Amino acid sequence: PGWLLSPAGRPYLDSILHKNQRRVFGLLERPALPPALAVPTVTYKLFLAGRSGVGKTALVAWLGGTPAPLAHHETLGIEATTLFWPAKPRGSGRPVLFQLHLWD
């Protein structure tokens, strides 16, 4: 669980942070990693559905490291957010970079 904060995982974490805040990536962007740290990217598309006002947008904001909206505003249509998360799966000697497309 603490791999991301270890010396081996820190370069991967630094690639997704900017001024200690999670960087917001566009649909076609990805973190820049040196060739020595290149890892496979695993892509998932997550669709969040539910009743109005239950916190879907706040959850996406929290996962993305951005402040949650203070007032409730209904999301019109679909809001897509792309975030990256480096991880080292148990039993694997190599880290992977998860690319999560969150559809809210």
Image (cartoon, rainbow, N blue to C red):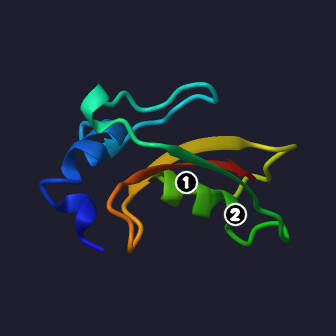
- Quadrant location of the N terminus? bottom left
Left or right of residue 101: residue 9: left
Q: Are marks 2 and 1 in contact (CB under 8 Å)?
A: no
Q: Amino acid at mark 1?
A: Ala
Q: Position of residue 81 (x, y in %)?
A: 63, 43
Residue corresponding to mark 2: 56
* Residue wearing tag 1: 61
Residue 66 at least partly seen: no
Sequence-first tag of 2 and 1 = 2
Few, some or many C-alpha atoms within 10 Å of disc 1 (few <14, some 14-19, many ≥20)?
Answer: some
At horizontal 55% and vertical 57% (from top left) the residue drawn is 70
3D distance between C-alphas at marks 2 and 1:
9 Å
Residue 13 in view of the camera:
yes
SS at badge 2: helix
Q: Residue at 36% across / 40% down in the picture?
A: 16
Residue 79 screen position, x and y as percent:
74, 43
